[in-house]
Amino acid sequence: MIALTYDDGPSAYTPVVLDALSRYDGHATFFVVGTSVTRYADSLRRAVAMGCEIGNHTYDHSNLKNLSNVQVQSVVNRTGQAVKDLTGADVRLLRPPYGSYHGATFTAAGMPVILWSIDTLDWKTRSTSATIQCVEQKAYDGAIVLMHDLHQPTVQAADAIMKHLKSAGYQLVTVSEMAAYRGGLDAHKAYTQFRKS
Ligand code: NI
């Protein structure tokens, strides 16, 4: 199993990822920012209908370390509520922007923090081939892969990545699906991967 995750969307490019997922019968997790969900509600609904998972990436890409607990609750809850209103889906995972959070974040957000074990650096390279190569070289069972569906070169890598992973025998699963098979999720913990125990 491998969990492909896409941050900072949804965006105009998100459908390219969804198209690829449907070709390879896969699921992914989209950690969305609240400010974009209404604009791209169709993609969000389609993702949910396909069995993908929507995670929380705060309302406006805040650095949670700089916020009070009340502010953390606000940026998390606003996003969760917006997704719920648009799709009916509950948002149960938090990916803090920049991977930045503090101990009080768990209590304030009331959900586990999901980080990553494979960082494609796609936002930096803006290279389709570098993103494909990174995932192909580093993929392993239980990995969480970080990408961003805000960037066109990233979504253009989706088909090749999924084709490769499927032919290598991986199931493309959501974070919650993988967690369910690998010990579950604790709302007071941060996770970077879900290896077999
Ligand atoms: Ni982000």
Image: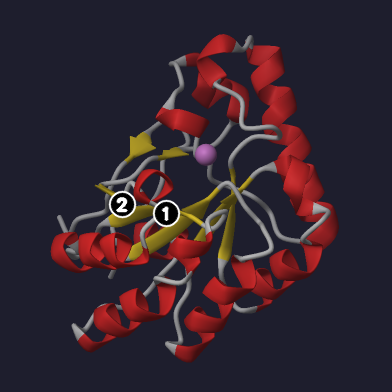
- Give left or right: position of 54 versus 186: right
**Residue at mark 1:** 147
Identified at 74% across, 48% down, the residue is: 36
Residue 1 figure quarter: bottom left
Classify residue 134 as left or right of residue 42: left
Residue 3 is left or right of residue 13, and the answer is left
Q: Nearer the viewer, residue 186 or 60?
A: 60
Provide residue 135's location: percent of width, then percent of height: 25, 63
Residue drawn at x 34%, y 49% is: 125
Residue placed under numbered mark 2 in the picture:
120
> Which colour scheme appears in the figure?
secondary structure
Q: Could you tell me if residue 195 is visible in this image?
A: yes
**Residue 188 shows up from this direction:** no
Q: Amino acid at mark 2?
A: Thr
Distance from the alpha carbon under mark 1 to that under mark 2: 6 Å
Label pair 1/2, CB-CB below 8 angstroms: yes
Q: Secondary structure at mark 1?
A: strand
Please determine whether, in this image, residue 93 is positioned above or below residue 107: below
- For disc 1, the neighbor class at 10 Å (few under 14, some 14 to 19, many from 20) is many
